[in-house]
Image (cartoon, rainbow, N blue to C red):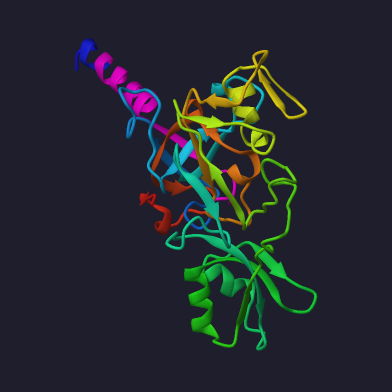
């Protein structure tokens, strides 16, 4: 092989790595049961992009993006991997932890009554349950998917499952925008409008907490709220036109994920790529995680 051909192969390989595909390792359990901690996966930077610019993920896709709240340049921010549940222009409503009833592969926390003392960690590991523990009254609190619940019921149909859902009227200060006017929690949230580039909304003291960070941080305008007046760039404003698209991201492990419910919208310029395939798991090698397509 001559030098020119070898150089061409090297350049092509680097181009594929840095401009088309890029590897990442999943570092948390927030995407169980879709992705496992330790999954080594490839993201597709070109798919859904327009001429190699910002990607345009579809609703329901798993996406890699830079964590918005890091106070460094975008390229130096931490990388998060979540599912896109809200597109620009959408209105997101979460009820009982779900954006819609057809969502699959989700996990929630449950209290499990075990009258026959059947549950143990060997059994749980066999059905891929690793999060939770035994309570002082010999019940269990476990993070489970519908598939795992079905597996447990096949072992003992006397198990009793109680989903740990927050009350609809319970206000959780840790949820975005931490505003008592929006008495939301992780399981009952919204409706919340996802900003779309070029779209104009009315702004007022009742909704400015939702969009202040966008105006001030992501789109670099000055903003002050004086009594009933909102002042943007030293002018009283009753409306605002968004300058880029935003997305709403959530983890599939709904009770163990810090996501848009806690820190708000993901700007389009923070998106990296759609997640394509799990190559293998670096912490627990298994054929089940080998070349697994991400859905």
Q: Is residue 178 left or right of residue 60?
A: right
Q: Is residue 243 above or below residue 110?
A: above
What percent of the width, then of the height, locates residue 125? 56, 68
What percent of the width, then of the height, locates residue 262? 65, 44
Residue depicted at 61% across the width and 46% down the height: 261
Give 263 or 177, whichever is nearer the viewer.
Answer: 177
Q: Is residue 38 above or below residue 145?
A: above
Q: Is residue 63 magenta?
A: no
Residue depicted at 63% across the width and 78% down the height: 119
Label count reads 0
Query: Magenta span covers which residues?
Result: 7-31
Farthest residue to the top: give it: 4
Report the quarter where the N terminus lies: top left
Residue depicted at 50% across the width and 58% down the height: 33
Q: Is residue 145 above or below residue 242?
A: below
What percent of the width, then of the height, locates residue 241? 51, 24
Give 48 or 156, whichever is nearer the viewer.
Answer: 48
What percent of the width, then of the height, locates residue 273? 42, 34
């Amino acid at each position: 092989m001559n030098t020119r051909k070898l150089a061409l192969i090297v350049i092509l390989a680097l181009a594929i790595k840095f401009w088309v595909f890029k590897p990442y390792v999943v570092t948390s359990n927030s995407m169980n049961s879709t992705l496992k901690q330790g999954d080594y996966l490839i993201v597709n930077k070109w798919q859904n992009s327009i001429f190699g610019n910002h990607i345009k993920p579809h609703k329901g896709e798993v996406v890699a993006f830079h964590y918005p709240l890091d106070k460094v340049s975008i390229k130096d921010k931490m990388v998060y991997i979540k599912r896109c549940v809200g597109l620009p222009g959408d209105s997101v409503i979460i009820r009982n932890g779900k954006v819609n009833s057809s969502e699959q592969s989700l996990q929630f926390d449950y209290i499990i009554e075990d009258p026959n003392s059947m549950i143990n960690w060997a059994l749980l590991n066999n059905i891929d349950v690793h999060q939770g523990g035994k309570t002082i009254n010999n019940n269990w609190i476990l993070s489970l998917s519908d598939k795992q619940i079905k597996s447990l019921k096949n072992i003992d149909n006397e198990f009793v499952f109680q989903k740990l859902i927050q009350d609809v009227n319970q206000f959780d200060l840790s949820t975005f925008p931490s505003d008592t006017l929006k008495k939301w929690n992780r399981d009952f949230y919204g409706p919340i409008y996802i900003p779309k580039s070029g779209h104009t909304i009315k702004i007022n003291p009742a909704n400015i907490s939702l969009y202040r960070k966008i105006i001030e941080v992501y789109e670099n305008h000055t903003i002050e709220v004086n009594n009933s007046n909102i002042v943007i760039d030293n002018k009283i404003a009753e409306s605002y036109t968004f300058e880029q698209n935003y997305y709403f991201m959530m983890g599939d492990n709904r009770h163990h994920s810090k996501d848009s419910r806690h820190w708000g919208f993901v700007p389009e310029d923070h998106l990296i790529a759609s997640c394509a395939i799990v190559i293998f798991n670096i912490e627990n090698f298994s054929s089940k995680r080998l070349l697994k397509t991400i859905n």
